[in-house]
Amino acid sequence: MPARRFAGGGVTGLAQPLDAPSRSVSTRAAGLALAALLVLGGAALAQIPASQWPSVADLLTGRPLAPLAEALLLHHYGPRLAAGVFVGAALGLAGAALQAVMRNPLAAPDLLGATAGAQLALSLALVLLPSLPVSILLIALIGAIAATVLTVAVAGGIAAPPLRLLLAGVAVSLAAGAGSIALMLASEERAAGLALWVTGALTQTGWVNLRTSLPWGIAGGIGLVLLARGLDLLALGRETAQGLGLGVRRVEGAAALLATGLAALAVCVAGPIGLVGTLAPNILRLLGVRTHRVLLPLAGLWGAALLVAADWVAVQLSTGALPIPAGVAITLLGSPLLYILVKRQRSPEAGARTSEGTSATPQPLRLFRWGGVLLAGLAAALIAHWSASGLAAALYADLTLPRTVTALAAGALLGASGALLQGVIRNPLAGPELLGVAPGASVAALTLLLTWPTAGILGMQAAAFGGGLGALALVLLGSAKGGFGPARLALIGLVVGTLAGALARLLILDSRLQLGQALVWLAGSTYGRGWAAAVVLVIWASVLLPLAWLLAARLDLLALGRDTARGLGLAVGRARVEILLVAVACSAAAVAIVGAIGFVGLIAPHAARLLGARRGREQVIGAAALGALALGVADLIGRVVLAPRDVPAGLMTALFGAPYFLWLLRRVGR
């Protein structure tokens, strides 16, 4: 039976709800997962020295274990293995249920914001209210539900197009993640205990968390299995299911609540872990499993096998200063699989365009009038901050002014990069963050920094350019089949960016970077940037921004279509390559200095169009000015909001940029 269309025009493997899979397929899938669990569990327990294992006689007579054997088996390897099985099963079940409710084969707790919401709620409780007499399970559940409800509300409801739903979830996740890191920076004495947890670690200090979570997890899993028939009917469409007598809202609400609860339990036990809920159900569908009475339990089984396998790989690779968490390992292993899955999918949403910029009348005077007012406001704020700081002019010029110059130049480069990318790909979601350019550039620069510390600023910028270009090539290669539509491009870019982020965390864990250094680099910051970095970045901006302005005239011709642009004498292929190279160079120059700062390159072009910029050159100039303003203000606020502590500018852009992006998605949805 062919796959069925679902809300938003996409195609999903959730179809064929009433075609029961053959017993042989289900048996093979279950047997493979069980065999993997047995082998991996045995490999984990085999790390205990043979001399410490109790004999059969000891077991039969109930003789106590040797102290070392008891410590290893009952308090280290045993709880860790059990946590992997529990968390993987919970995430697999949650992913399968959410995909059925949303009619979206890529839905999962991490992609819909539930995981990040639970993480933020627990971080708030542990850092600000450590003595709060409330169960951590309840706190995590409240956070997960709140984030999921926000995602669905912004996207326009459960039946919203899948692209909008996933992008809303990503924005909520980024904002919640930025909030969690900000809390860690604000409370360094408690941050050490959260540092490994926020990366998704299965290491346990005993059986307390598992004993508390297991009954709730079993109840949630049973509840989802009991809803299997209703989820099968939902795959026929909401109207058809309702015509067959199904209480659609009741089933959707119950399944979503149970799935969110399972995700919250997983966060309580092991921290935020992604991709398991996406991969396990999709692998089973590729094997031919369709009905949810079989898919749900098998998704739990496969989720457990995937996470235990990732944890085993993490143990084998842990040779650095800190052990590699299972969350980082599953991201490294699962991102290529997710890349293939997204590439195989038909486009989840027809090419959409944002509604800003539809007016045919250019309004450059309005743009520059607003831009002048905003830049004047920034100058006034800087003067006020100088006066409030009480620093002498010389000290201010040495410590604060170079940071400000760096922020302004980096913001201008990121804004121009976003405008060029959105124009050449003709996609309103084509910012350097969502296309993987910024994450790819960041991980390449970080690799060079850790392997060759004396490479210098220019060496890091060259590495960042190569990493950003490679990431963009991967995204464009995976999106070419769908004509570079917004849906496929955003999803492929998200996968590549996730992989780059996991690689960066792996490099940091394998090195000897301190917690503060690692968080600052991952978030993006101007902290500690002196005149050397500022001058280099200003030089790059003075070269690349005029070049971007010159090339931007070609965006107006490209917007007319390939054939029309070619008929007007434009070498379309060459023009696109040149614009892409300059866009990547702009992003790489900034990222190599300040790290992967998000949302500036994505939102600045939208803001420029809202202020009246219509033509390519107007958009590049406006995006550069607004990008400089956004990052300059973010850096300024980051210095004073928790003074004397410094909040990275990247966290501030995420905290303020994510709500703006959510508003933009909601506005476009209307």
Image (spheres, rainbow, N blue to C red):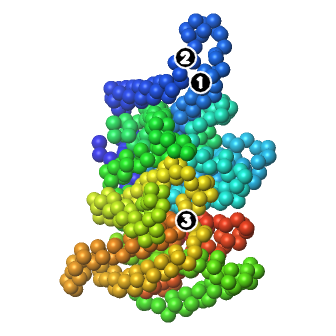
Name, please, the residue furthest toward the bottom: 365
Q: Residues within 10 Å of mark 1 (few under 14, many from 20)?
A: some
- The residue pinned by badge 2 equals 51
Identity of the residue drawn at 46% across and 47% down: 331
33 w.r.t. 167: above or below: above
Q: Residues within 10 Å of mark 2 (few under 14, many from 20)?
A: few
Tell me where residue 34 sits by quadrant: top left
Identity of the residue drawn at 51% across and 80% down: 535
425 w.r.t. 494: above or below: below
| Whole-percent x, y for residue 467 in the image | 39, 62
- The residue pinned by badge 1 equals 73
> Which comes before the other along the chain, label 3 or label 2?
2
Tell me, yes or no, if residue 632 can be seen here. Answer: no
Question: Of circles 2 and 1, which is in front?
Answer: 2
| Whole-percent x, y for residue 251 in the image | 54, 43
> Is 108 or 358 nearer to us in this picture?
108
129 w.r.t. 211: above or below: below
**Local secondary structure at mark 1:** helix
- The residue pinned by badge 3 equals 524
| Whole-percent x, y for residue 292 in the image | 44, 36
| Amino acid type at image mark 2 | Ser
Q: CA distance from mark 2 to mark 1?
A: 13 Å
| Amino acid type at image mark 3 | Gly
Tell me where residue 203 sits by quadrant: top right
**Local secondary structure at mark 3:** loop
> Which comes before the other along the chain, label 2 or label 1?
2
